[in-house]
Amino acid sequence: MKRFFILLIAIFAIVSFSKAQQCDNITWSTNPATITDESAEIVLTTTLDCAGTAWTTGDLYIWMWDDASGTYPNGDWNNSDAAMQMTDNGDGTYSFTFTPTTLNGGATGITDIGFLVKALDGTGDNKTPDQHILFSSGINDINAFSININPNPSTGIFQLSKEANYKVIDLTGKLVLKGYSNTINLTGFTAGMYIVELSSIEGTSLQKLIVK
């Protein structure tokens, strides 16, 4: 009998663990591809591959926030608002059309919109990881503290003038590297522009990194 109860507990633990798995495989795009106007309409299209997780997607909802303290009609975590439901395009993709300054209650000065895709009830990790839509303008205007990066452009090694937490994001909004150091190593990454968010107790700074 004791072995039976131990087996039941083990099965329960395994099932609970599987239900906690989030859907990590998300690809997405925006139209227009480059976002410059916070008052213009944006079409966000996503594709999810949740194979191997306990999440059966069904109806999808988007959950949003931004760096301008906008108020989005997200609803409750276990009951998303109908206004945030994504459209099933019938081809495996889902889309959501919105105007940032209209949807967020009129807040302006947006440079970064964060979002994730979730089930109506997000309980049990029925969601994707956080994603970011970065605006191409204003990147150098929100520096809350001074930190220098050299050399920039670089072939991959960027030296910071002080240690900081960093998150490196590509121009699709995908997080490609994070850590805490006075060096950011993008050796081997595709040449082009990246955005780095630097943070410390002094504040937060967004800057461009150019990989040659």
Image (spheres, rainbow, N blue to C red):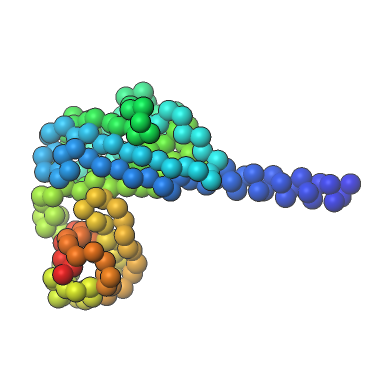
Res. 205 visible in picture: no
Spot occupied by residue 78 in the image (x, y as percentages of width and height) = 47, 32
Residue 103 drawn above or below residue 35: above
Could you tell me which residue is drawn at 24 percent across and 46 percent down? Answer: 133
Q: Is residue 89 left or right of residue 70?
A: right
Residue 191 drawn above or below residue 170: below
Spot occupied by residue 207 in the image (x, y as percentages of width and height) = 17, 61
Q: Is residue 19 left or right of residue 64?
A: right
Residue situated furthest front in the rendering: 91
Q: Is residue 164 left or right of residue 57?
A: left
Q: Quadrant of residue 37?
A: top left
Could you tell me which residue is drawn at 20 percent across and 59 percent down? Answer: 195
Q: Is residue 190 left or right of residue 54?
A: left
Res. 210 visible in picture: yes
Q: Nearer the viewer, residue 202 or 22?
A: 22
Residue situated furthest right in the rendering: 1
Q: Nearer the viewer, residue 10 or 203?
A: 10
Spot occupied by residue 2 in the image (x, y as percentages of width and height) = 86, 50
Residue 129 drawn above or below residue 46: below
Residue 36 drawn above or below residue 163: above
Quarter that holds the C terminus:
bottom left
Could you tell me which residue is drawn at 69 percent across and 44 percent down? Answer: 12
Spot occupied by residue 33 in the image (x, y as percentages of width and height) = 17, 43
